[in-house]
Image (cartoon, rainbow, N blue to C red):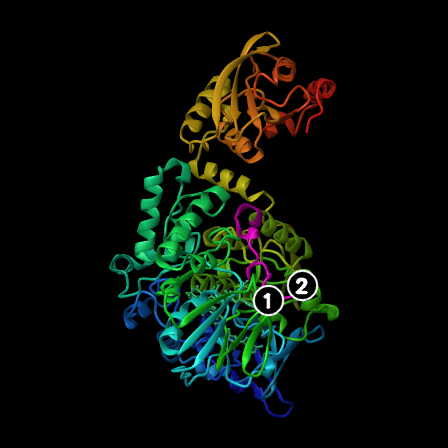
Amino acid sequence: MLQEQTASRHANPNNGVQHADVAVVGAGFAGLYLLYRLRKAGFTAIGLEAADDVGGTWYWNRYPGARCDIQTIDYAYTFDPELDKAWTWSEKYATQPEILRYLGFVADRHDLRRDIRFGTNVINGRWNEGTGRWLLRTSDGPSVSCRHYIMATGCLSSPKPPEIVGAGSFSGPVLTTGRWPHDGVDLAGKRVAVIGTGSSAIQLIPIVAEQAAELVVFQRTPNFAMPARNGAPSPDRLAQVRSDPAAYRAQARQSLTGVPLPMQSVVSWQFTDAERRERFEKMWDEGDLVGMLTQLWADQGVDVDGNAIVADLFREKIRSVVRDPETAETLTPRDHPFGAKRPCLDTNYYATFNRPNVALVDLRKEPIASISATAIHTATRKFDVDVIVFATGFDAMTGAVLALNPVEGRGGRTLAGLWAEGPKTYLGLMAAGFPNFFMITGPGSPSVLSNMVVSIEQHVDWVVDRLIDMRAAGFTTIEPTETAMAGWERHLADCAQVTLHRLANTWYTGANVLGKPQGVMPYTGGVGLYRGICDEAVQRGLLGFRLTGPNVPEQCNDGEIVRLQPDVRAVLGLLAQMNLPAIESLGAAGARAFVEQFNAGRPFGRPVGEVVDGVYDGAGGPLRYRLYRPESEGPHPVVVYYHGGGWVLGDEGSDDPFCRDLCRRSDMIIISVDYRHAPEHRFPTAAEDGLAAARWVATNAASLGGRGARSWSLAGAPAATSRPSRASSRAIAAVRRSAASCSSAP
Ligand code: FAD
Ligand code: NAP
């Protein structure tokens, strides 16, 4: 039978230790849902929260203008369907006070506060091998002994300290957006400095500009911002969520970002300029940030050129609003792709710089040298101010976890040690060496790249479901293996290569904190995919986890959850969904017809300078080639390209999108050559044709627009080049020898 007990009943005043099955650190969206689920599941749980009340982010960030940037219909709990009926959001993007009221409402509705110790900072946590429990030391009150220890401490809860010389010597009020005073601040008639131009600053600046006598904004990196166009919640979305709430929420859970929007499949170059502009303007007018990030075209987040089109349209908007061209240029982001750094939603941000009482200082040109009692000094100027606002952000994703000193796992291993070169986790949920230690939206999970409430609910459900399963099976510890953790690290890095996040210095990569290890910290593969992987780990017998218990044999199903490259995995996944016949069952003719039909349905490749079809001298007579020439002025290096198809399928045009991409990115001429196929033409016919193609290109390179006989190379799809049989290896070696004799490939 499920027991409902309050944690306080387990306090032991004699030895100053409070006992519970589970300790939950943090009482924001994550902590509250954890306490709800744990209690329902019959675990005793203690919440430990540094703040005086629930709310987390929405308790601390009380600066003027603070709102969510995911529409509130979506940025809300879904675990309690009655909540949608019991709570009505007043705005499309709710304000901080409204979201805080909502979290208080949820806490009251489920009587969650009774399990939380407020005003209590957890200082460290140590695993005791003998008892199989964690001991958490707190700033106040008894320590906590728990079997399971869950960090719901937030990704953006540890504000960065001011890193500027003399910040402590300023005599006026120094405010931080992430720790804003509860009773507000009167800025009327004051000279105010705001340092930073991230999401917090961009929300705050227009309001401060209206209140203050003078406002000086100190900008290090300009950001992309678009108007929120706040107002009543979107009628379309309301209608959708009301007509079929379950379907609406299910779509969000399987989506890329945790917001129920479809994946786009049409790429930028399939639209005309006018169509692209129209799509952009629609999102701009709707004030939908997630829509702008994901709904324009399929390549906007993964391809620099597809992205540059969006970025240019943003830049145009900035120029159209900001009257002074120099100020407009200073506000224009040029050092990162759109979306690689968190873009912002604003209300009148750019127009604020047209006001006579607002000045912008470009810290790239004149960095802050110091702060004195009354002023901010750059190398060339002194700005006398009455109030300084630090809108300088957070030690994101790892800051709050590593603030505990130490988190000590098995054998004295510390989390700070394990993460010295960047966070290492399995699924963003756990780390090897730290049994029963969980993180909600930890590094390595989609977290901050998603609607976080959806990600929080998924993590909480996964963790609590595991605790329930463990209890039923008699296990008392769970811990990921080193192999699983290393595999996840590789998968994260592979995914990070696909998106453009790696091209920006941001808090996603740790670049905003001096000395912090650099690397994309959140999982960039998307919410739906990630959820599938977490579920797969369970379905495959808790793959990657070791479980132990006093009266049961150890269970360790070691291994890596994802072994394929993300793009290969995506393609294989799509193919699996299509339920296609096995290609080897079709016969050569059937397989060729199938591939032809399949290729006809794929997106058209990117435009290149020129595409020329021609004929070359194959080993047994003329064969076709297709030449892709870059847009830039030649001559270019030349690549002879052998299409894939296992020596049976394909022709000079069957890898068309890939060849176009290769041509564009390498700025080389790509000549895709046909060769004769098995089974009609048995080995080594294809290899002989390939050799003939190489010779033909070497001889004709200059007339084809190449740099000459000594500037060409070979490339091919994996089936043709990377896993050759012994016979084909000999043929390839012959081509290579021939190539070496007539070229010095670049
Ligand atoms: P938090 O809300 O950060 O709560 C963590 C709690 O843990 C805090 O209350 C903190 O005091 C406590 N804590 C930390 N360390 C300790 C310790 N050692 N001992 C005791 N207590 C501790 N996300 C979105 O998806 N959409 C948005 O629109 C959005 N807007 C945002 C706006 C702002 C201004 C900020 C800063 C973030 C925003 N986010 C948004 C991200 C936001 O942080 C998450 O959406 C969400 O609120 C996180 O909830 P959480 O419970 O995981 O963490
Ligand atoms: P942020 O995005 O990290 O912005 C901090 C700003 O301060 C940046 O412009 C940064 O410049 C600048 N800065 C940092 N250190 C500095 C220094 N020493 N000197 C000068 N400038 C410095 O932080 P944030 O604005 O608090 O937002 C953090 C995240 O919280 C957001 O990305 C978002 O996910 C969430 N958030 C959301 C909303 C919302 O609209 N819902 C609102 C606020 C926050 P660099 O860029 O050069 O580092």
Residue visible at 38% across and 82% down in the picture? 188
Vertical placement of residue 36 versus 597, above or below: below
Q: Residues within 10 Å of mark 1 (few under 14, many from 20)?
A: many
Residue type marked 1:
Thr
Q: Main secondary structure of the magenta part?
A: loop
Q: Are marks 2 and 1 in contact (CB under 8 Å)?
A: yes
Query: In the image as oriented, which residue stretches furthest toward the top?
Result: 621
- Which residue occupies the foreground of this view, 235 or 351? 351
Visible residue check, residue 375: yes
Q: Earlier in the sequence, mark 2 or mark 1?
A: 1
Using the rendered view, name the quadrant where residue 268 is placed: top left
Q: Which mark is residue 398?
A: 1
Horizontal relation, residue 558 to residue 20: left or right? right
- Which residue occupies the foreground of this view, 319 or 572? 319
For ligand 1, tell me if the residue under mark 2 lies within 8 Å: no
Horizontal relation, residue 381 to residue 683: left or right? left
For ligand 1, tell me if the residue under mark 1 lies within 8 Å: no
Q: Which mark is residue 419?
A: 2
Q: Position of residue 704 (x, y in %)?
A: 56, 18
Residue type marked 2:
Trp
Magenta stretch bounds: 496-516
Q: Secondary structure at mark 1?
A: loop
